[in-house]
Amino acid sequence: MVESVTFSAIPDIPMIEPGDDLVDIVLSAVTRAEADIQTGDVFIIAQKVFSKAEGRYAVLEEVEPTAEAVTLGEATEKDPRLVQLILSESKEVLRHRPGVIIVAHRLGYVMANAGIDASNIGASNGREQVLLLPVDPDASAEAFRDAIKKATGQDVGVIMSDSVGRAWRSGTVGIALGAAGVPSMADLRGDLDLFGRPLQSSIVGFADEVAAAGSLLQGQGAEGAPVVLARGLKMPWEAAPASVLIRDIAEDLFR
Amino acid sequence: MVESVTFSAIPDIPMIEPGDDLVDIVLSAVTRAEADIQTGDVFIIAQKVFSKAEGRYAVLEEVEPTAEAVTLGEATEKDPRLVQLILSESKEVLRHRPGVIIVAHRLGYVMANAGIDASNIGASNGREQVLLLPVDPDASAEAFRDAIKKATGQDVGVIMSDSVGRAWRSGTVGIALGAAGVPSMADLRGDLDLFGRPLQSSIVGFADEVAAAGSLLQGQGAEGAPVVLARGLKMPWEAAPASVLIRDIAEDLFR
């Protein structure tokens, strides 16, 4: 028998507005698509959708940049008000050059621009606004999972995904900013190889791999398919939030 | 209509020996599984399988470590003969500490131990051996793709995958060491967002995301499912080898 995992884009997810009930919107879209939800399924949902529902907008003209933001804005050729928001969302600026600011986000993610996004956002009364990451992505994923359980009785996993750049390799890939009901890491230590010897490098970034797979269907442009459902994933490891995927600074050779 | 991608592990891939005809072995396994191959399918195949078929073994007791390898072996608590092989496969040692050597592989990949593997290898006449990466992963993928075309008439994509560690995040993820017949990068620049504005960060590491998805089914231990078939991927971008995913040193802020 062939073991398979299927990733399906849930069509016709409407534009999300602050205060929207994401679970209700997703369940309606699943029903319209004549799909269903089963225990063991994993939702991969774009961060942007959570951020919009949580109203994580900032209006640029309301931001007062500090001197630090002005200086960094000049060095990176970025709007100092945006730079101020990036600094406010970060613990540390790791690298910068024109066009690029790489930070350690307040939650530990290393990423460009603290994950602040200006695509697919729209204006607020004609005023330019941007979208910050959710306050607590693991908590947002957990709340979504709990609400799905309450509404359907099904025990699903939830991954909040984002597309990020990487050291050493070009192109962005999906990673898990938040997770609930899934093993964010798959610990294969103790497993034996084909010759009965312990496996060597054997901790897998499971939720990041699922997020990357979901990203293949999410698209990033006008097609907008921010919600993907994975069916068939084997997950014989303990569930853990996505925060476990953030490497300890003491163990990080590239900070 | 729901858009879907399905990743299926091809069961019962036998142990691969040097000189084996990988295409013949994979096609036989596909037939045994009562699966089929269609134009547009993408094979995700573990690097180890290619390396074994290509006989990329090194016997440790035949390696003469240089003084540099002995010194680095002491600093990292690694066998100096293994360290010698790592150095021979690399352009540069980027970081090291006990148990870890991060290098720029001769082909540009930044990875631990130059991708040399001691799991699932077995001994050679009782002598410990390790497995190096293929000489040219993109060429290996291309040859596999060509042979599938010749044998079946179907136009498939091929990704040679490996699991690697990352800066900033714990756990390994699958990446594409080699690729043929697939767009290794998906360039969304020029696409517009939901509001008609150009997308910002818009070059996706497509082949890496496919490799990560395949890794979810490959496993790493005794279960050994090194060949995964993806069906349903949309790939409206020009095919390119996986080498395009290696970031130029001049653009790399974390070397």
Image: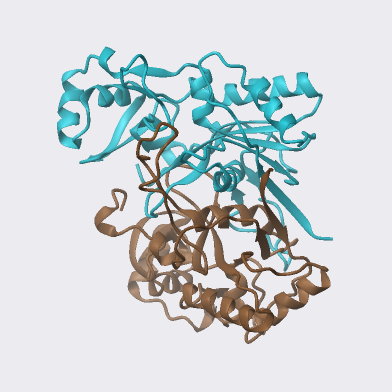
Chain colours: A brown, B cyan
Count the marks: how many? 0
**Which residue is located at x 67 percent, y 65 percent?**
A226
**Which residue is located at x 39 percent, y 58 percent?**
A75
- Image quadrant assignment for residue B60: top left
Using the image, determine if residue A28 lies above or below residue A175. below
Camera-nearest residue between A105 and B118: B118
- Where is residue B43? Give x, y as percent: 66, 35
**Which residue is located at x 39 percent, y 70 percent?**
A107
- Image quadrant assignment for residue B76: top left
- Where is residue B195? Give x, y as percent: 72, 68
Using the image, determine if residue A252 lies above or below residue B231. below
* Residue B64 appears in the picture as rendered: yes
- Where is residue B174? Give x, y as percent: 51, 43
- Where is residue B29? Give x, y as percent: 68, 29
Please indicate whether residue A182 sits to the left or right of residue B231 in the image: left
Using the image, determine if residue B108 lies above or below residue B236. above
- Quadrant where the image shows the N terminus of chain A: top right
